[in-house]
Amino acid sequence: MMYERLPEHVRHLVSQCAVQQAWEMSASKVIAPFLPSALPVPSSLIDRLGRIHVSAGGLAIDQKKVVPWKDIREIHTRPAFEVVTTSMIDKAVQRATFVLPPIPGARKGTDMVAGKAKEAVLSILKVALSGSSVSLQFDLPIRIVHRRRLRTHEMNPGLLSLAFLALPGVSDGLLSAAQSHGRSIIRHPATTTPGTDRAAEALRERVRGMTARLGTQPPPPELTAAPEPPTPEPPTRRTRNQYG
């Protein structure tokens, strides 16, 4: 089963979505274990790539602030096969390259995090698209409408968060939590009628090809910390007899 090919810590995160009321699927939780311990990368920095938080307190998608369930008005979904497209995959991998600012103190750190983010996106999508096309026909949350300060706002999952939601059971876990809090779920029907088997296979081929290309790239240079600036020596005091 392709699900078993996920790293153990990612399988653990996925399993939490189905059995626990509080869980979080975030870029830092997925990517950080693959990074060298010497690389000082704050979790908040990596989570700019994607984060989903579900708890009794509320919901947060790609933002720090958790929105209380009472403030959430509607959760809109669409069939996954209309959301997870080749264009979405291309953008998800591309976004991992430039979304991160330079990491202080590590010249190659940003490139390494971006490379691991690419690997994570492709690995997650390979699992999400594995098996039959049935795996693409579940409802995937794409828009969460909520109230804040008398105004209506929206949370829209970014590309990596969409990849998280495409994993087995993650979308169901989010929607089950919303239903348990009495939130309105609006399920939009498919607007296209493609041959779903062919669409799923095309996506799988796209991911396989991108994974193969990523695997043929040379490994990143060894991570080295930026050299410390030389400690300035105190200025020499000139004395009356210094120059003879």
Image: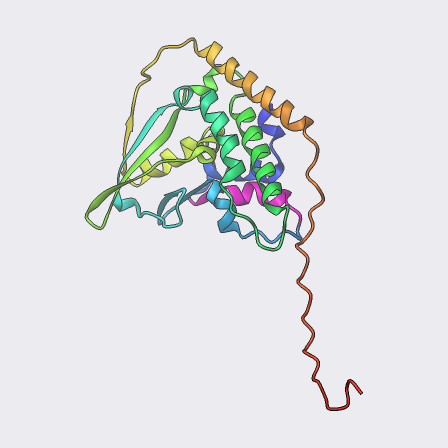
22 over 175 or under it: above or below: below
**Quadrant of the rendered structure where residue 195 is?**
top left
| Residue closest to the far bottom | 240
Left or right of 56 on screen, residue 30: right
The quadrant in which the C terminus is found is: bottom right
Give coordinates of residue 20: x percent, y percent.
45, 42
What number of labels is visible?
Answer: 0
Please say if 224 is above or below 136. Answer: below
Instruction: Give the residue at x 58% y 45%.
Output: 110
**Which residue is outermost to the left?**
150
Q: Picture coordinates of residue 198 (x, y %)?
A: 48, 10
| 184 or 26: nearer the viewer | 26
State which quadrant residue 30 falls in: top right
Residue 32 within the magenta-colored segment of the rendering: yes
Residue found at the very far right of the displayed protein: 244
Q: Is residue 134 shown left or right of residue 130?
A: left
Colour theme: rainbow
Q: Quarter of the image for the N terminus: give it.
A: top right
- Residue under the point 51% across and 44% down: 100
Q: Is residue 211 magenta?
A: no
Segment colored magenta:
21-36
Image position of 193 with respect to 208: above or below: above
Q: Residue at x 55, y 48 (%)?
A: 102
Q: Position of residue 184 (x, y in %)?
A: 26, 34
Residue 60's spot in the image, x, y percent? Answer: 38, 44
